[in-house]
Image: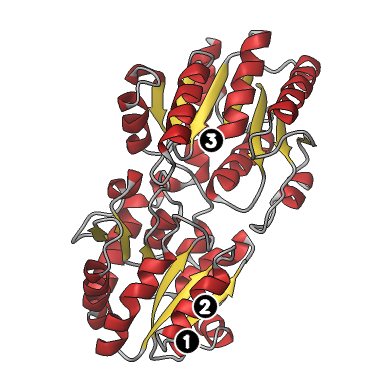
Amino acid sequence: MNVVHFITRLIIGGAQENTLLTVEDQHRDYGDRVTLITGPGLGPEGSLEERARRGGFDFRVLPELHRAIRPWQDWKAYRALIAMLREIQPDIVHTHSSKAGILGRAAAAKLGIPAVHTIHGASFHFGQNPIAHELYRLAEKWAARRCAKFISVCDAMTDQYVAAGIAPREKFETIYSGMEVEPFLSPPRPREVVRQELGLEPNDVVIGKIGRLFHLKGQEYVIAAAPAVVAQHPNAKFLFVGDGILRAEFEKYIADLGLTRHFVIAGLVPPSRVPELIHTMDIVVHTSLWEGLARVLPQGLIAGKPVISYDVDGAKEVIISGETGYLLPPQSVAELSDAINILVADPALRESFGRTGRERFTEQFRHQTMTRRIREVYATLLGSSPSSAVPS
């Protein structure tokens, strides 16, 4: 197959890792002619561009493409993309993220190329002002008419888009966001070594959260819950993995509570270090208010950790309260403290939840499973035999 993937930025993030793994699998395992087009990876989140450049496939950066809405720049990006697509002549254009999703589907429709769009997280979501929310909804509805198929990373994304009138349900296919599962099954470095590097003691019970230190990611709720946890369990430590514009604010908040020695902020790390950092944790918490289906949820479970998450978007599809962790009301603090305290006090329960999660979700979240199913969607749209979608 000849496929173009188009994404706004190739920063370190779930949507970007999902896209890059799909491209790598198509190129390496199926022998597809695959092109990855992205805008400049600007921002404090880190970049996956160097990995893409080493991938051996056609990788292009479109300088005109930026995340912010800039009508003149967006028009230039649209025209430049059309020129690239005319040159490449792909069978399918597969778009990812909001800006690239709109421009990419428009360009594909202009040239009569079937387009597939992956919903990694709704572009209209909690926390937006009402005008922006409605504009994004209308833009998605407009782009949906130029899209042959939607791929949702969880059923919740399909439900939200159907409820918002974007497209009928039959236009959606759920394919969970795949990943390299082996490092989560068996970490590349011993847990004790990594914990020692982070300044953690052997008897510390570590509650970890992975995510940018950014609005809607929810670290403030973990910090607010911490005093009640530390009061009962002085050996509780909190580990934040990630960086961002709110770091100084969070550090001050922690200091004001007198909890600085109970928190470790590891900062920005390459994706290759995430498995070993999850293995340093005893409990994984996820308190984002908008996420699609956060990759850290299955990652934590595959690593054998219990996961506590707010009940947003696709979280309930992997976090089963009382079996793999606890689902809590968004923005709750007392409930979060209580759930953490239950798990800190009960190592056997932590082990039971983690074992159940690993058994239920390891195969479902392998990136090879994701790529195979994505290619089956392509084959259906192109009228070719799915039997061609077999790794070489």
Q: Position of residue 173 (x, y in %)?
A: 40, 27
Residue appearing at x 33%, y 24% in the figure: 162
Q: Position of residue 42 (x, y in %)?
A: 72, 50
Q: Is residue 199 above or below residue 311?
A: below
Residue at the extreme left: 322
Label 2 SS: helix
- Label 3 with label 1: CB-CB less than 8 Å: no
Q: Which residue is mark 3?
A: 371
Of 59 and 331, the residue lying toward us: 331
Front: mark 2 or 3: 2
- Label 1 with label 2: CB-CB less than 8 Å: yes
Looking at the picture, the colour scheme in use is secondary structure
Disc tally is 3
Separation of disc 2 and disc 3 at Cα?
A: 40 Å
83 vs 320, left or right, is right
Mark before the other along the chain sequence, 2 or 3: 2
Q: Which amino acid type is marked by label 1?
A: Thr
Q: Which residue is mark 1?
A: 260
Q: Which disc, if any, is residue 113? A: none
Q: Which disc, if any, is residue 251? A: 2
Label 1 SS: helix
327 vs 36, left or right, is left
Separation of disc 1 and disc 2 at Cα?
A: 8 Å
